[in-house]
Image (spheres, rainbow, N blue to C red):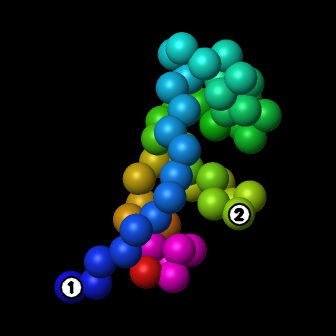
Amino acid sequence: MRCAVVEFTENNIRTDLDAMQEMVEINSQSTPTTVIDGEVFIGFDKQKISEKLGL
């Protein structure tokens, strides 16, 4: 089993209006929404996110 450390920033759209605005700007209306190098992943897709991160 491979183990990796991935740094990330978590934003709470309920308490952070800037984070909510960012969601609007990328046309996402659901969580989780993950942005990696400008690519948007809506929902949790472990395989796609792992591939993008090279894991």
In the figure, residue 16 lies in which quadrant?
Answer: top right
In the figure, residue 9 lies in which quadrant?
Answer: top right
Q: Helix, strand, or loop for circle 2?
A: loop
37 lies left or right of 54:
right
Q: Is residue 14 above or below residue 22?
A: above
- Seen at 54% across and 32% down, the residue is 11
Residue 53 in the magenta stretch? The answer is yes
The magenta segment: 50-54
Categorize mark 1 by other alpha carbons within 10 Å: few (<14), some (14-19), many (20+). Answer: few
Q: Helix, strand, or loop for circle 1?
A: loop
For the residue marked with disc 2, what is the amino acid? Asp
Looking at the rendered image, the quarter that the N terminus falls into is bottom left
Residue picked out by circle 1: 1
| Secondary structure character of the magenta stretch overall | helix
Q: Is residue 47 visible?
A: no
Q: Earlier in the sequence, mark 2 or mark 1?
A: 1
Residue picked out by circle 2: 37
Q: Which is nearer the eye, 13 or 43?
A: 13
Looking at the rendered image, the quarter that the C terminus falls into is bottom left
In the figure, residue 4 lies in which quadrant?
Answer: bottom left
x, y percentage for residue 46? 38, 65
Categorize mark 2 by other alpha carbons within 10 Å: few (<14), some (14-19), many (20+). Answer: few
x, y percentage for residue 40? 65, 54
5 lies left or right of 36:
left
